[in-house]
Amino acid sequence: MPDGDILIGGDWKQTSDGQTLPVFNPSDGSEFAKIARGNARDIDAAVKAARKAMDGAWGRMPAAERGRLLSKLALKVAEHAEELAVLECKDTGKPLAQGKADATALSRYFEFYGGAADKVHGDTIPYQHGYTVMTLREPHGVCGQIIPWNYPMQIFGRSACGALAMGNAIVVKPAEEACLSILRVGQLMLEVGFPAGAVNIVPGLGHEAGAALSDHPGIDHMSFTGSRQVGTLVQAAAAKFNRPVTMELGGKSPQVVFADADMDAALPFITRAIIQNAGQTCSAGSRLLVEDRVYDEFVGRVAEKFKALRAGPWDRDLDIGPLISKKQKERVEKFIGDAGKDGIKLVASGEVAANAPSGGYYVPPQIFGDVPATHILAQEEVFGPVLAATRFKNEEDAVRIANATPYGLVAGIWTRDGGKQMRMARAVKAGQVFINNYGAGGGIELPFGGFKGSGFGREKGFAALFEFSAIKTVAINHG
Ligand code: NAD
């Protein structure tokens, strides 16, 4: 995989016009690699290669064999975990421990779906006398997959595994900001024997390669992970072809802390849920809702934690790394600056570590207090290490505030009261609800996806296998 290539039909090649894009190291701002700047012609070639794979060896491969390939890949990724982690960290800036966790998760994706590939089957349905009716689970065909930069490996694994396990061929458009790990995994996929065209990877700019993919008539299913704004464009393009889509969009997920909560247990989860990946996590716990009676005490304890947090380059493996780009840093700093102008109180801030490279895109973790639930800081996704704390009076008030954003991805509920736990789990509109714990995104086994503006459709778990396949009903009249 020389710098700047794309993977089409089992071969690494240059884009049709030879264009590339620079890759920057967010930890110091230096340029250190090149990726391809794929265009509409490259996307077209990738879609044709995927179709050929569906009509050929890949389309005819038994489910157990597909599973075996995914399982082999899981082992291969585990063998290369350290290398993949370092590549991901240089590319995204995330601390090494996070990069290692992401590589482990990627291997686990392939392991889980390798085992699941031959476990999904149709049913027979009791119908009229003289009939046998069955359902078949069929792949959609060629799946387009647009991936963001925040967890390139993991989100590639998340989207690719369900699709491949069900026998679809994929055309992947990773993010222009970070995708080196995905390209490396593409190489490993060829090494373990994925047939030509089953997996095609074309990096490039969103409005070029991304738009060409979402607008391509040869795509049978589209999965998109990214912002609400671009998700709307991808849906509009899909509507022209009446094509099914899976939308994994943003979040403004609440952590709801009741007065009876085990505060010692909650504290590390709440801090981690917003600083993980420098807050650039769709499922970040970016709102802290605390019952009035314990608000001052609990927010005070979170503030103490925040003061001790340090941001620095990926290889120092501190609490957080830099943001992905200069543009993202400026965006986050604008949210922070505007909050200050609106009189929102900064309760505590961490620091950028002494001698962190001056060209890096660092923003220290910060917590703002008494943020009105309607303020933009409590409504919109900052996608940075910024926590907005808000008071609530009682359970009803907590539900109202928790649900009062355009999003509905994840929620954390902290209480010892079993009744309250169940009532809250049912009342909060979120695709995942964690009670007395919080897993940003959760394990591979757990279905993941949004309500409301956070999107629709589910990836992860067995749910992804249903998402990436369709039911065909066959009714036989045999008399
Ligand atoms: P983005 O929407 O700008 O980009 C995501 C992808 O879409 C990139 O590959 C980009 O190149 C592509 N793209 C951009 N313009 C396009 C266009 N016109 N047509 C087709 N593709 C286009 O998002 P981002 O800034 O990269 O990522 C951050 C956002 O992603 C946040 O909102 C975050 O919450 C969300 N996200 C969601 C999940 C989830 O699972 N729900 C996971 C990670 C990130």
Image (spheres, rainbow, N blue to C red):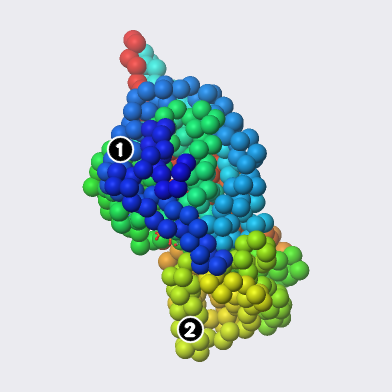
Extreme residue in the left direction? 240
Label 1 or label 2, whichever lies nearer to me, is 1
Which element type, helix, strand or loop, lies under badge 1? helix
* Residue 254 in view of the camera: no
Tell me residue 282's x, y (percent). Answer: 51, 60
The quadrant of the rendering that contains the C terminus is: top left
Q: Is residue 222 left or right of residue 417?
A: left
Identify which residue is drawn at 44% across, 40% down.
Answer: 467
Tell me residue 390's x, y (percent). Answer: 57, 78
The quarter of the picture showing ligand 1:
bottom left
Q: Is residue 370 left or right of residue 168?
A: right
Q: In the rendered view, tell whether residue 190 sits above or below residue 387.
A: above
Question: How many tags in the picture?
Answer: 2
Residue type at numbered disc 2: Gly
Tell me residue 26's x, y (percent). Answer: 53, 65
Identify which residue is drawn at 63% across, 45% down.
Answer: 81
Residue type at numbered disc 1: Ala
| Label number found at residue 45 | 1
How far is mark 1 from mark 2, CA to CA? 46 Å
Tell me residue 335's x, y (percent). Answer: 47, 78
Which residue occupies the foreground of this view, 79 or 120? 79
The quadrant in which residue 22 appears is bottom left
Q: In the rendered view, tell whether residue 365 sits above or below residue 232.
A: below
- The reply to whether discs 1 and 2 touch (Cβ–Cβ < 8 Å) is no
Identify which residue is drawn at 27% across, 43% down.
Answer: 41
The residue that disc 2 covers is 337
Q: Residues within 10 Å of mark 1 (few under 14, many from 20)?
A: some
